[in-house]
Image (cartoon, rainbow, N blue to C red):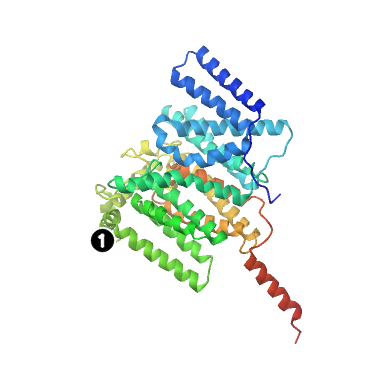
Amino acid sequence: MTNAQFTWPTLQPKDLILVLICALVGVGVAVVAGLKPILVALAVVGVLGAAFIVMQFELAVLTLLVMRSSLDILTTAQIPAALALVIDGVALLYLFFTLLQRKPVQGDWFLWVFAGWVLLMGCWPLFAGLGFFDSYLVADEAFREWTRMLSLVLIYFLVMQLKDKVSPRQLLSYLLLALVIPLGVGLVEVFTVRGRIASTLTHPDALADFLVIFVGLLIWHYRQTKQRRWLLLLVPAGVVFFKTGALTGFVMMLGFLAVYALFTLKPRNLLFGAAAVVVFLGVFFSTEVGQRRLDKLQNTPLFNSTLSFSSAANLPEGNSFNWRLSQWTFLVVAWQKAPVLGYGLRTADEVSPYGISAHNVYLMMLVETGVVGFTLFLGLLGAIAARLTQLWRQALPGSDQRELCQVLIAVFAGLLVAMIADNVWNYTTFWFYWWTMLAVAGWHWPKTAPLLVQRAAKSDRKLLFTSSPK
């Protein structure tokens, strides 16, 4: 099916009775267990949420996709971590009952590669629990990280189950609702917060990377509809993006714009892309945050010939680039002491003398999982590249699906660069929407090209059959 449309459901009396029963069960279990009032409330909400998902699966997944971007601000209350456990439980239960009823499970080859990768990464929490690493405390952190990884592959799985139930264009339209609250909070912070902003996310860099993928989604909507309202939304998104002051997000955005422009090799489009990059650079470095970043760049070995990389690594204070060199130097030395399996998941901040994350995803994987895990991670990146290339080639030229693939390829190119100097792998919200859009790109799309492409093809066929051989 390629014309599936989602319609808002109506609750029947039997559904309301089921909800009431579930609520009473939740209260009863919590009271018998002697839990605190807040835990009683959470138990009721959890049971009601499970009932809601069972009764309205499609609506529940769409609601989850819209709400996830606003939950990182509740990290101190452990809401995102609890949500990851809920996603894991719901997806596994859905898979179990689907197989029990002998119904088909939607998926593609990348889903099984992704799931296999996550299962293999589960060896590190197992090794930590068996005492292969120095501290048993590593096992708790490793298991939390692996649970987060599992929730990401299960999001891909859940979105795949919406195939032929919700149209791709419809889901991508709903997905833009996830931008409303982070963008609204970010605009308020632009005028009320001095310095960098993070909106509803945990860190300014996380907000910047999140905005990159949604800028791509806005461009995709504009390319399909030619409605200028999508371009107008780029203005507030750009204002919030610049206020994050995220240099790695800035590089990621530049990579996205540059690669996306290469897909349209027309002189006009290339000139527009070049102009967009120039304006982007000018606006960023004209802001107060951009000026501070520029001043720090000028005091690095890249722009200061009197400063060597070794001396910069020994002077990390006051400059994030020089600090990263020092951090990476320590991590490389530490990796050499555990080169095969590393130190375990989520241990880079413990290995580092600064006590914080690696700020380099590749080096983080190398230190935490050794050569074995690093090779598996490169294999996952290669599988993503292969999947995107396959979908792009299969899609009709000028079709909505190919346009989406081009957006994702451009984002992925910027992502590969950003991971050199940032903790992108830890930004769960970004990956949540990345895996969602990658799953949608592999759905069944209408096998019709846009009107302009159809007219061009028709003109070519007419020319073919009317021309006489020489």
Estimate the x, y position of residue 305 in percent, counting from the top left. 26, 62
Residue at the spot 51% in from the left edge and 22% down from the top edge: 43
For label 1, the residue is 304
Residue at the spot 64% in from the left edge and 41% down from the top edge: 161
Reply above or below: 186 against 263: above
Task: Count numbered badges in the picture.
Answer: 1
Question: Closer to the camera, 223 or 294?
Answer: 223
Estimate the x, y position of residue 463 in percent, counting from the top left. 71, 78
Report the side of 135 relative to 286 (left or right): right
Residue at the spot 57% in from the left edge and 56% down from the top edge: 405
**Looking at this rendering, what residue extends furthest in the bottom direction?**
470
- The image quadrant that residue 189 belongs to is top left
Question: Closer to the camera, 421 or 176?
Answer: 176
The residue under label 1 is which amino acid type? Asn
Question: Closer to the camera, 403 or 127?
Answer: 403
Report the side of 117 relative to 365 (left or right): right
